[in-house]
Image (cartoon, helix red, strand yellow):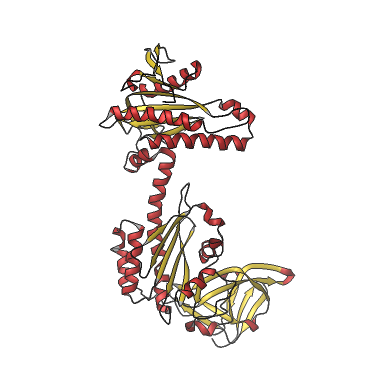
């Protein structure tokens, strides 16, 4: 640009220059860059924020210091080391639009932006074929193949996608030249405390600090990420980490490495960068599907979650099924809550729920819900009612034995429970209001199981079952006779079952 150019904030001139440069980029407004020595205000030392552009390099942001020591955070940026194509703006300063009130161009005019056209094989694939790939692993492999078809010298590609899951933090998809297929790792939330993650480009980018680019043939500062040295020792010459933002604001990460002598070209990285938003949406779809499944399995159980995802979502939707129903209640819970600090009591309650759930699942059942300090579980009969009842009885014995190994406090040497089991036809489906549904079982068998548990607690038996649960001879089953249960019109012939069989 020729002539004097000024950037102003209020009545303060921020910069004045006759040597300013204009950068035109695809789908971006033109940006005027000023030589650092033509600034009329002070800028602070570089702060932690950086952003990456595959055309220009890594931008370092600084605070703008106005008169009166007022600061505008991250108001200016500069490319201290540029890629070859952007060498003319090395050491120049750009201003974020919010830092300016007026830009005086003199007799100069900015050209209308040329948005260009990046249509090509990769874009065509993303718009047409990619949508039909069933898994993120399939998508990752196909994406690698398409980049190779475009001549991108890719030797390693990773995608870090954060998850909504009670146990795992996300998925890390890894493709490496010479290895078959795509490897998926699913780290737990402990990843955030691991040194190898804390000191990795993945953490840097996912925290919103911008992308990164390293030419590994040049000297890599020792204080930078250890993985860079590892990759260089393995023959890599170039490395880039780019953000893949999801629509909910979470930032996922794509990394690429090359072992080609010259690494990636600007066109190579520009192709990936231009498509990154679309690529991010595909992974978001994959993760949303998995998140929905994980949330449903966590809150309503695996079988019930599958039914909901399968379309059983309307009030009243459900099936009549034959099943064994178990109701397991923690005994002495009120006393334990009085004796223990709140955090220890919650930890103990979680231990009870986990132990009970594990034994139910190990024996073919499913936990439907936690009710206060009790567990409701179902053992669907399917084509084998006898097996379902035997599974429920085996789970009850296993629960009692496992709880006996847990010492809740010095005054109580083990956890205790009261279990009721009954079988019959129940409605397995949705009930509730129009806005809030519950996927559960409704029927007399569920009522009887809960009442048998209460009765066992009152008479001192840990496991009480209805007669139809005893599908084979139980020599040690103790007959309790016809038991009158609360809110059950007909007495139920019941038996107490010793836990240590």
Write the residue at 47% across / 30% down.
Answer: 401
Image position, residue 406 (x, y; %): 54, 33
In this rendered view, identify the residue nearer to me: 449 or 254.
Answer: 449
| Residue 56 % position (x, y) | 50, 78
Q: Is residue 460 above or below residue 330?
A: above
Q: Based on the displayed image, in which of its 4 quarters is residue 441 positioned? A: top left
Q: Decide: is 7 above or below 408.
A: below
Question: Is residue 295 at least partly visible in the picture?
Answer: yes
Quadrant in the picture for residue 286: bottom left
Q: Name the residue nearer the viewer: 205 or 326.
A: 326
Residue occupying the point 38% across, 29% down: 394
Residue 436 visible in rendering: no
Most extreme residue toward the right is 68
Q: 129 and 418: which one is in front?
A: 418
State the residue at coordinates (34%, 43%).
309
Q: Quadrant of the C terminus?
A: top left
Q: The N terminus is located in which quarter?
A: bottom right
């Amino acid at each position: 640009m020729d002539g004097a150019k000024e950037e102003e904030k209020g009545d303060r001139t921020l910069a004045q220059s006759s040597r300013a440069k204009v950068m035109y980029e695809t789908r971006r407004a033109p940006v005027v860059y000023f030589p650092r020595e033509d600034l009329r205000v002070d800028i602070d030392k570089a702060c932690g924020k950086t952003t990456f552009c595959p055309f220009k390099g890594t931008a370092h942001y600084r605070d703008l210091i106005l008169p009166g020591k007022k600061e505008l955070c991250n108001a200016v940026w500069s490319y201290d080391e540029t890629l070859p194509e952007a060498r003319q703006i090395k050491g120049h300063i750009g201003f974020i639009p919010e830092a300016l009130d007026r830009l005086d161009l003199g007799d100069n005019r900015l050209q209308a932006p040329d948005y260009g056209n990046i249509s090509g094989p990769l874009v065509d694939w993303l718009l047409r074929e990619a949508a039909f790939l069933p898994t993120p692993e399939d998508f990752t492999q196909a994406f690698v193949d398409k980049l190779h078809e475009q001549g991108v010298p890719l030797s390693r590609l990773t995608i870090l996608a954060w998850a909504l899951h009670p146990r795992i933090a996300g998925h890390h998809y890894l493709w490496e030249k010479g290895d078959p297929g795509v490897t998926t790792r699913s780290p737990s939330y402990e990843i955030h405390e691991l040194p190898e993650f804390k000191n990795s480009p993945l953490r840097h980018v996912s925290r919103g600090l911008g992308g990164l680019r390293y030419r590994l043939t040049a000297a890599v500062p020792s204080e930078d990420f250890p993985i860079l040295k590892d990759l260089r020792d393995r023959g890599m010459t170039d490395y880039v980490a780019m953000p893949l933002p999801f629509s909910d604001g979470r930032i996922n990460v794509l990394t690429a490495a090359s072992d080609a002598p010259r690494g990636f070209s600007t066109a190579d990285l520009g192709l990936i960068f231009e498509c990154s938003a679309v690529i991010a949406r595909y992974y978001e779809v994959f993760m949303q599907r998995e998140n929905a499944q994980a949330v449903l399995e966590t809150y309503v159980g695996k079988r019930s979650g599958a039914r909901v995802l399968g379309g059983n979502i309307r009030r009243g939707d459900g099936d009549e099924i034959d099943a064994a129903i178990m109701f397991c209640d923690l005994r002495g819970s009120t006393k334990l809550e009085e004796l223990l600090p709140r955090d220890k009591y919650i930890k103990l309650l979680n231990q009870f729920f986990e132990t009970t759930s594990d034994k139910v699942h190990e024996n073919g059942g499913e936990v439907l819900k936690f009710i206060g300090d009790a567990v409701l579980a179902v053992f669907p009969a399917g084509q084998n009612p006898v097996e379902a009842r035997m599974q429920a009885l085996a789970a009850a014995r296993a629960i009692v034995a496992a709880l006996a190994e847990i010492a809740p406090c010095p005054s109580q040497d083990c956890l205790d429970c009261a279990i009721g089991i009954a079988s019959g036809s129940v409605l397995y489906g949705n009930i509730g209001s129009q806005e809030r549904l519950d996927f559960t079982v409704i029927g007399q068998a569920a009522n009887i199981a809960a009442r048998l548990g209460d009765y066992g607690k009152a008479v001192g038996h840990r496991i009480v079952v209805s007669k139809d649960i005893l599908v084979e001879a139980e020599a040690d089953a103790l007959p309790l006779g016809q038991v009158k249960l609360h809110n059950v019109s007909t007495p139920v012939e019941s038996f107490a079952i010793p836990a240590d069989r």
